[in-house]
Amino acid sequence: MTETEVRVATTADELEDAFSVRKTVFVDEQGVDESLEWDEYDESDSDAVHFVGYRDGEPVGAARLREAEAGVGKVERVAVLESARGEGWGRRLMEALEIEAENQGFDKLVLHGQTSAEGFYHGLDYETTSDVFDEAGIPHVKMAKEL
């Protein structure tokens, strides 16, 4: 593969690529305990949709979408490798995720964003809906966007 793209991870290799980005960013870089990073939505029988971004064939970004409740999707595990930050990968991942959310019939997206990424999500029209709280030892806020 030589394209630079974001795609829905449908093969075992693409899922492994998404998981490797998440491990590098969340576990290795941010120190999140592996037992907190992986959950039932990463299992093969889950309805969650995983996304992976490729730059010149190498995985550089990942994200996950799942149903939180009827009509509401939850954005999770958005990660971009340090070497690819500032290149628009976060925005591309979120655009692909929002298209999939609309295709699934969601009319709202929610997420728990790290406070360090709050400005990024504001730039994509997400609104902060909570005070700061701790998740996996990292300050987060709840955010939402109507689709």
Image: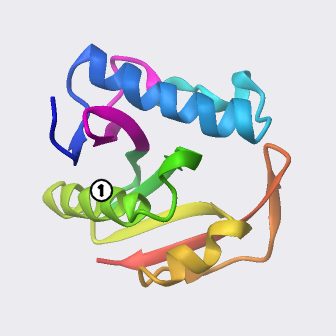
In this view, 40 is above or below 60? above
Residue 47 image position (x, y, % from top left): 31, 33
Residue denoted by label 1: 97
Q: Is residue 146 visible?
A: yes
Q: Which residues are magenta?
A: 42-62
Residue 107 image position (x, y, % from top left): 28, 71
Q: How many marks?
A: 1
Residue 57 image position (x, y, % from top left): 25, 33
For this view, does 134 lie left or right of residue 43? Answer: right
Q: Is residue 16 magenta?
A: no
The amino acid type of the residue labelled 1 equals: Leu
Residue 35 image position (x, y, % from top left): 72, 22
In this view, 18 is above or below 147? above
What residue sits 35% from the left and 17% below the top? 44
In this picture the colour scheme is rainbow
What residue sits 49% from the left and 74% below the top? 144
Q: Is residue 54 magenta?
A: yes
What residue sits 85% from the left and 46% below the top? 137
In this view, 77 is above or below 42? below
What residue sits 45% from the left and 55% below the top? 75
Callout 1: helix, strand or loop? helix
Tell me the quadrant of the picture where the N terminus can be found: top left
In this view, 131 is above or below 34? below
Q: Is residue 71 visible?
A: no
Tell me the quadrant of the picture where the C terminus can be found: bottom left
